[in-house]
Amino acid sequence: MDEYAVHLAIAAIAGASVVAISAYFMHRKTLAQILEFARSMEKERDRVKEKDAKENSTLLEESAGNAGGMYHYKRRNHLSRRRIAIGRTSASLPDVTVARKMNGTEGEERGIGSDAEVVSTEMVFKDDDDDDDDDDYYKGMGVPPGLPKVQTFPKVSNSIKRIVGHVTKESSPKSPATCTSTFDSLEGSDDEDNVENNAEIHGSYLEADENAEDTECNTFIQTMPDHIDANGNPIPLGSANIIRSHSKSGDLHGVQPDPIAADILRKEPEHETFIRLKITPNEIPSMDEAEAYMVLQECLQLREDYLFMEEVAPWEKEVITDPSTPKANPNPFSYTSEKKTDHYFQMEDGVVQVYANKSSKDKLFNVVDATTFFTDLHRILRIIASGNIRSVCHRRLVLLEQKFNLHVMLNSDAEFLAQKSAPHRDFYNVRKVDTHVHHSACMNQKHLLRFIKSKLRKEPDEVVIFRDGTYLTLKEVFESLDLTGYDLNVDLLDVHADKSTFHRFDKFNLKYNPCGQSRLREIFLKQDNLIQGRFLGEVTKQVFSDLTASKYQMAEYRISIYGRKQSEWDQLASWIVNNDLYSENVVWLIQLPRLYNIYKGMGIVTSFQNILDNIFLPLFEVTVDPDSHPQLHVFLKKVVGFDLVDDESKPERRPTKHMPTPEQWTNVFNPAFSYYVYYCYANLYTLNKLRESKGLSTIKLRPHTGEAGDIDHLAASFLTSHAIAHGINLRKSPVLQYLYYLAQIGLAMSPLSNNSLFLDYQRNPFQTFFLRGLNVSLSTDDPLQIHLTKEPLVEEYSIAASVWKLSSCDLCEIARNSVYQSGFSHALKSHWIGKSYYKRGPDGNDIHKTNVPHIRLEFRDMLWRDEMQLVYLGNADIPDEIPT
């Protein structure tokens, strides 16, 4: 073992010796090479220095006597590079020189994007130690009259060519006066007026010397700074000069307009162009995709068959010739007697049927029967459950979203500049409609608190309620609650939704009771009370006044008809007329709470047929004979829609194809949502046909759908409704979501309301729907419970813009959608968003009214048309006008 260890040690020593000797000789060889390279570099520096000295002496002789600028350059010995700089103004400010390479004949320039070398620059920071280099300054070449001051340098060596970097950076249109470098700051200099506006490739920054003697050399050009005198010495700058005040032109901010932005501002919107996306190749769909598209065609055709459409469009009935603001009706509640017609109507299996006269047996207006409706509904439900169709629709929706993201990346600046071209318009003064707000909660909590205190102070002895066999004054009511006006505050009022209301619709409804007292709700928030709704009428007029003052905000208030008795219609119309509740900024929707089971339990109704009779028979009576309900006839002129409301999260039994008729529905269970929807749709369809034949206004079905509950709610509304409120459950069904996109069904979404009840704000699909191109708008739902400010609609927009980073263009597009979804008259829509608003794409847009760029609407229309052609396999028949 000892002998073996000795042998190993000897071998290790020998190996280490060989390695050490090899390393020594390799080190010597490398060191010799480095020393030889250093000597050669020193010789090269000496040769270049001699050559430059000769060129400098020649240049100084030629330029003697010329009033040029003083420029400085020096060589870095350790890098063999030359730095080129302008005389400095401050030790803390960089000196910048712009270089442009010239090739070919005199004055010929090769632009960026061609094969020419890139325009480039180098920035040099001069320190206080550079004072020793002042003797390196020299005078520049003379400049012909009429051209900006320039400096031409001699030919630059190849080593200098390698050190220059890219300089051609276009200023952002969003911040034309903000610069990211000293080079960019030349854009706003006082010599900007000397620069040619039509110069090619950033001509506002660079200007070539056309009289340069040597066109084959590299020419460095820059406008002489204002802080250098004729001898090249720096001129001291005062604070006013540093700010570059332009008080002569009236610019208080000291910033000159960006010439690029100014040019776009002068352009007409019709001339806007944008970068178009061609992402999906024109390929033949696979067999599975073609089958899916044919099924989607079937769904769209079903909706077209069901939906009520006016035979004569509003823009054909009323041609707008006067572009001025429509005149307000001075007597909105005046009634002129109209002759009764011979129409005869009667309820048959839950649907009112109309005949020409009492002896006629032929129905004037045929509507789909209940069995057919429920059969088609089940067909839709089977389609949306198909895996193949779900995959196709999901893929198309994701592609739509990504296309929009790419469009924004490529065209957001162009859209922003296009918005600047619309004088006067911005988000605050484009029309916005609150497309979903309940009248009983239309005021905010502070407004209601002030109103209650005001009434308690001014009218304490007003008899307001009958309770427990006694008439009570307002003062006595508050004394019974052990409250005074001084005690009241917002917290005690307790009408604001909080964490306790999440997934608790019953607790949310209790928030309608001020101070938790139903008697206060009856006094202040009901129109059928002892004082005939006077207090609610007064607070409503105050809300109307706020809307009128804002001018650009409108609302569609939902007010309830419960269906307990037929006289409800006359009571509501009388309350509207007697309290003079009229505003050009307001229209009404009727909401029907789905409370059959409660009324049945209380003995108010015996079957579901009683509710349908109480709701629809008075409407047919006033349509046939306006003299029978004159106030209702006047009120219906401002009613534009019909809504269904209640807690959708309640479990319900899905309807079968053969359901009992309303007269047969006598059990205590509440009918399913789709059951309500069909009978409301069928009766409204017949009513609208009758009213249209008499030249009266029509009423559209716009129910609460998709806030919670089963997906069949959205399927039933797809067949029957013009627009819906909420619709957040569309995120669970890609097929229905794609169908709602293709049909462009309006969604009045309320993210803040959903956040209090069913869905956290950050999970709300509003942003996704908007990106994908669904017809979405923002609404407040219940300002009393949800919002804190005097302008709840603007609060809704502002929070959405902050959370989802919506741009001004996005907000204006959403506001434009809200006007489209609303039920305001054709004359008002023409005034608010353009006289051709009913046309598709940019042809229907007036950027001077909507502040939405044509670029955005052309892109949306292009994508929608592509999807329609894809679904219809290239055979889509797309009308030029949007259906109403």
Image (tube, grey):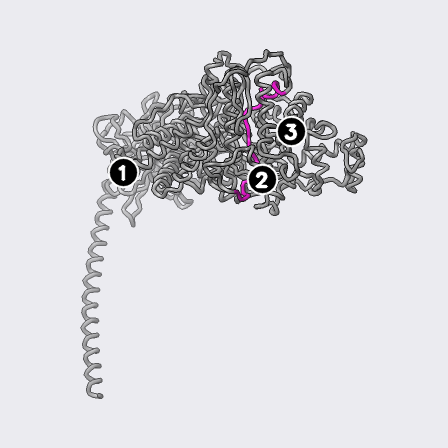
Front disc: 2 or 3: 2
- Tell me which label, 1 or 2, sits earlier in the chain: 1
| Quarter of image, res 394 | top left
Crowding at mark 3 (Cα within 10 Å: few <14, some 14-19, many 20+) = some
| Magenta span of residues | 632-652
- Tell me which label, 2 or 3, sits earlier in the chain: 3
Q: Which residue is mark 2?
A: 667
The relative height of residue 696 versus residue 225 in the rendered view (above or below) is above
Image spot of residue 536 (x, y percent): 69, 29
Q: Which residue is mark 3?
A: 565
| Quarter of image, res 156 | top left
Crowding at mark 1 (Cα within 10 Å: few <14, some 14-19, many 20+) = few
Q: Decide whether residue 757 is among the magenta residues.
A: no
Q: Which residue is mark 1?
A: 287
Q: CA distance from mark 1 to mark 2?
A: 49 Å
Q: Is residue 384 left or right of residue 669?
A: left
